[in-house]
Image: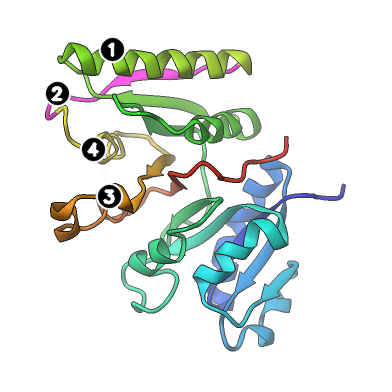
Amino acid sequence: MKKDQFVALCADSLQQANQLIPVVKPLAESLRKGIILFTTSSDGDSWVHQTGLPFAVLKSDWATVVESMPTAFNVVLAVAQVNPDSPRSTLSHPRQFLKSFREAKIAYLAVPAIVSELHLSTVALTLNHQRESKEKLIWASYLERFCRSNVVVYHHPYSDPAFRQRLNNNIRYLEKTFASLGLSFELQELPQGSQFGDPDLKAIRQPEIDLFISLVADARERDLLDFFSPPPPLKLIRKAPQTPILFLNQRDDLYIMCD
């Protein structure tokens, strides 16, 4: 069957590509998408054909390649390896990975180098009192529909009435979205603690999470104090170094799947 949308496998070397293929191939098959191998490696022409995948060797920086993926190649999801021990200039270094996908209009999956295959039994995300991205809920629905994942939604146990009301509004939107697709989810309160902190940082440490979905806030919303600490996506990667994380940038023009 001809595929009209694709999952991008992003790699800097043959070894990295071979490590990611067992992760990407079952995921793409479940989502009913094709696969394209992307590399910006200077020696990419010498090894890409060995993977047996369609490929694009691009003499450019990763950020430019990522920008071209949805429009030039019909990519809806990019997958790359993350490894804090990799050289700072490579895509797999967490800071470089996040920098390369900072303006991405597609979902991008950070796969820890220690992960050799992707298990999707339990997919988790959070809701809070703020406006939520509908794309985060859409991607959770994709994973339940196509990968048969159980979706767990975590939230703070707000005591503030205004925060609680806003959270309830978001929960109702979640219920409406999933009910319209005949899907279910599990709602769980996070352990007691600060209700003003980032719920993602607490939720991602909950047991038995196979994949975590996180919304990357617009950098323009960060205040001066935020610039003296690591950005939230980097904190997430460091907080759960064994958990694959599906990132979605907070923007209104994200590409979604044709299903």
**Which disc is residue 198 wearing?**
4
The residue wearing badge 2 is 192
Which amino acid type is marked by label 2?
Gln
Q: Of the residues under marks 1 and 3, which one precedes in the sequence?
A: 1
The residue wearing badge 3 is 232
The residue wearing badge 1 is 165
Q: Residue at x 39, y 19 (%)?
A: 170
Cα distance, mark 2 to mark 4?
A: 13 Å
Q: Quadrant of residue 7?
A: bottom right
Q: Quadrant of residue 41?
A: bottom right
Which amino acid type is marked by label 4?
Asp
- For the C terminus, the quadrant is top right
Q: Of the residues under marks 2 and 1, which one precedes in the sequence?
A: 1
Q: Of the residues under marks 2 and 4, which one precedes in the sequence?
A: 2
Residue 51 in view, yes or no: no
Give, as a single range, the part of the protein colored magenta: 183-194
Which amino acid type is marked by label 3?
Pro
Q: Residue at x 33, y 77 (%)?
A: 88
Q: Secondary structure under badge 3? A: helix
Q: Of the residues under marks 2 and 3, which one precedes in the sequence?
A: 2
Q: Of the residues under marks 3 and 4, which one precedes in the sequence?
A: 4
What's the coloring here?
rainbow
Q: Secondary structure under badge 2? A: loop
Is label 2 or label 1 in front? 1
**Which disc is residue 111 wearing?**
none
Cα distance, mark 1 to mark 3?
A: 25 Å
Residue 151: image location, x then y, percent: 47, 26
Is 110 part of what is drawn in magenta? no
